[in-house]
Image (cartoon, rainbow, N blue to C red):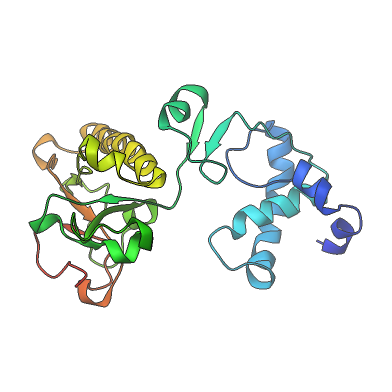
């Protein structure tokens, strides 16, 4: 693939209008078959020369599409993404077919004791810290659900469900930033939704007696003092970020 052929014919405006990346993609079968070979061929080059992150496949998709002249039509109302706005989750669920959740969400963790896992100073902005209320946050990242080493894998039958986010009173929410308020609303839809989906999966594929229905899986950042894990069972030792 000669990338110069693409660069000589496509400026940034045309690229943004016709070849912006990011799933979901809808395409005729023949166009998929036409694209796949070039996409796979371009991917190692993109990873090695341009971008070695996890989105390299998307950049390769855009380059392959541009190379083949497969112009795209972008529907902004098809998927809601927090890259554009932190809209209220009601809009996410009622006006769009797909929801793109951001990397992380954080709210105040006020339940104390075994719930004090993620440090508020690590995840909240300085102006959002409330040391008189709590020094901890309930934090969630979709990337913390991946299996690493011997940690729990979300899809295993005997793995607990996610710990639910805390319930904050109206006074706490009213005194919180709009970001915290938005994160709170989203988390109370996102986490129960994930738990419901994974439980349905387990009911279909696991033996009934092996299914763990307890909300005990707490996700957290990877640190040396937690063995570089991304999740732990609530109440186990050595997971606090002191």
In the visual, does 217 lie left or right of 146? left
In front: 75, or 126?
Answer: 126
Locate residue 223, reporting x and y percent.
28, 73
Look at the picture and state if 108 lies above or below 239: above
- What residue is shown at x 74% (from left), y 43% (from top)? 34
Left or right: where 184 falls relative to 157: right
Classify residue 164 by image quadrant.
top left
Q: Is residue 196 left or right of residue 68?
A: left
Above-or-below relation of 217 to 78: below
Q: Position of residue 72 (x, y in %)?
A: 74, 37
Task: Return the x and y of residue 150 as percentages of the image width and height.
Answer: 23, 66
Q: Residue at x 61, y 56 (%)?
A: 57
Examine the rendered structure and indicate whether residue 172 appears above or below residue 242.
Answer: above
Quarter of the image for the C terminus: give it.
bottom left
- Camera-side residue: 171 or 88? 171
Residue ranking furthest to the top: 94
Residue 92 visible, this orientation: yes
Q: Would residue 2 be visible to someone looking at this image?
A: no
Front residue of 24 and 223? 223
Furthest toward the right, the residue is 8
Instruction: Name the residue at 58% across, 38% down.
Output: 24
Whole-percent x, y for residue 214 in the image: 12, 42
Of 97 and 124, the residue lying toward us: 124
């Amino acid at each position: 693939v000669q990338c110069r052929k693409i660069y000589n014919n496509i400026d940034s405006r045309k690229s943004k209008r016709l070849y912006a990346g990011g799933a979901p993609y809808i395409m005729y079968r023949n166009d998929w078959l036409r694209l796949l070979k070039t996409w796979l061929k371009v991917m190692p080059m993109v990873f090695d020369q341009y971008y070695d992150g996890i989105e390299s496949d998307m950049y390769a998709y855009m380059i392959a599409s541009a190379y083949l002249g497969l112009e795209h039509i972008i529907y902004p109302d098809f998927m809601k993404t927090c890259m554009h706005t932190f809209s209220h989750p009601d809009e996410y669920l009622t006006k769009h077919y797909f929801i793109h959740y951001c990397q992380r969400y954080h709210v105040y963790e006020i339940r104390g004791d075994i719930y004090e896992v993620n440090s508020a100073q690590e995840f909240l902005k300085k102006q959002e810290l409330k040391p008189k209320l709590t020094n901890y946050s309930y934090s969630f990242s979709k990337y913390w659900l991946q299996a690493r080493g011997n940690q729990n894998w979300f899809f295993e039958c005997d793995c607990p469900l996610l710990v639910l986010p805390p319930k904050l009173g109206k006074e706490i929410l009213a005194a919180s930033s709009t970001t915290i308020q938005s994160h709170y609303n989203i988390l109370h839809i996102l986490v129960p939704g994930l738990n419901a989906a994974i439980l349905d999966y387990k009911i279909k594929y696991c033996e009934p007696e092996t299914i763990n229905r307890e909300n005990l899986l707490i996700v957290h950042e990877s640190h040396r003092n937690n063995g570089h894990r991304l999740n732990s069972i609530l109440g186990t030792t050595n997971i606090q970020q002191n």
